[in-house]
Image: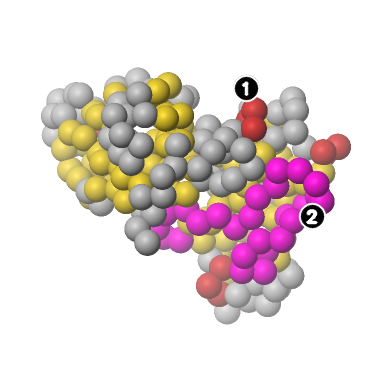
Amino acid sequence: NAGVTQTPKFQVLKTGQSMTLQCAQDMNHEYMSWYRQDPGMGLRLIHYSVGAGITDQGEVPNGYNVSRSTTEDFPLRLLSAAPSQTSVYFCASSISTGPSEAFFGQGTRLTVV
Amino acid sequence: AQSVTQPDIHITVSEGASLELRCNYSYGATPYLFWYVQSPGQGLQLLLKYFSGDTLVQGIKGFEAEFKRSQSSFNLRKPSVHWSDAAEYFCAVGAGGSNYKLTFGKGTLLTVNP
C-alpha cells in the first residue's frame, strides 16, 4: 500500500549540479503533478501530466524539466541547480480530473549551496 | 486565474476550544475546494473536499467546512481542538474541474496550548 513514493527524502546539491527527483505511484493514477513548498508561500505548481507522454507547465516551471514515459513514474529534473531552487518538493497523483482528490508523497527536501 | 487567500498566518487556541480557519478563493465558476493538513516534516493529508451539493461537508478528525458561494469562502471548523491538531493547514482550489492543478493558500499554522 505504498501510494506516492518520492526519492530521495533529502538532498544537498552544489550550484550548477544536475539531479532528478523521483516520483512513483502504484495506484494507476492518470494525473500527476509536482509542487514546490517555500516558507510563507504555500505550494506552487511546477509541472503536471495528464497521462503518459503528456506534460504541461504550471505556475513556476523555469529551471525544471519533466517527462512521463510510464503511468507510474513522473521524474522532475533540475538541469543546473540554483540556490533559488532550495525548497521542499511534493509529487501528487489523482485518478481522474473529476470529483476526486490528489494524493501527495512525503516530499523531498532539497538544499542548493 | 484562480487564487486562494488564508488571512491568518498563525492562530493559537487552547485545547478544547473551538476553531475556525478562514479561506477565501477567487474563481469564476464553481471550484473544487480542498483542505489539507501538514504535520511537521510530513506530506499533505486531505481533511475534506467540496465538489458540489451540500455546502456543509464533513471530513476526518472531526473537521467540517462550509462552502459559501456569496462570500467566496470555504472556512474550516472544529468544535473542540485537540493537542494533536497542531499543524499547518492549507486551503486549495482546483479550477476547471481539476484536482491536479491546484492553487494553494499560503497556509495557517495552528498552535494548541494545553
Which quadrant is the C terminus of chain A positioned in? Answer: top left
Name the element at disc 2: strand
Location of residue B47 in the rendering, given as x and y in whole percent from the top left corner: 60, 58
Whether residue A16 is visible here, answered yes or no, is yes
Q: How is the image coloured?
A: secondary structure
Residue found 45% across the figure and 37% down from its top: A30
Whether residue A85 is visible here, answered yes or no, is no
Query: Would residue B97 appear left or right of B79 to someone viewing this image?
Result: left
Residue found 36% across the figure and 50% down from its top: A26
Count neighbours of disc 1 (C-alpha within 10 A) and say few if under 14, some if 14 to 19, many if 20 or more.
few
Q: Earlier in the sequence, mark 2 or mark 1?
A: 1
Chain containing the residue with disc 1: B
Residue identifier under label 2: B56
A67 over B34 or under it: above or below = above
Magenta highlight range = B39-66
Residue found 65% across the figure and 72% down from its top: B81
Discs 2 and 1 carry the same chain letter: yes
Residue found 36% across the figure and 29% down from its top: A52
Name the element at disc 1: loop
* Depth order, front residue of A45/A98: A98
- Magenta-colored stretch includes residue B100: no
From the image, state whether disc 2 or disc 1 is nearer to you.
2
Count neighbours of disc 2 (C-alpha within 10 A) and say few if under 14, some if 14 to 19, many if 20 or more.
few
Q: Label 2 to label 1, Cα distance in Å?
A: 26 Å
Q: Amino acid at mark 2?
A: Leu
Query: Would residue B80 appear left or right of A83 to someone viewing this image?
Result: right
Residue identifier under label 1: B1
A33 over A55 or under it: above or below = below
Location of residue B18 in the rendering, given as x and y in whole percent from the top left corner: 73, 69
- Magenta-colored stretch includes residue B57: yes
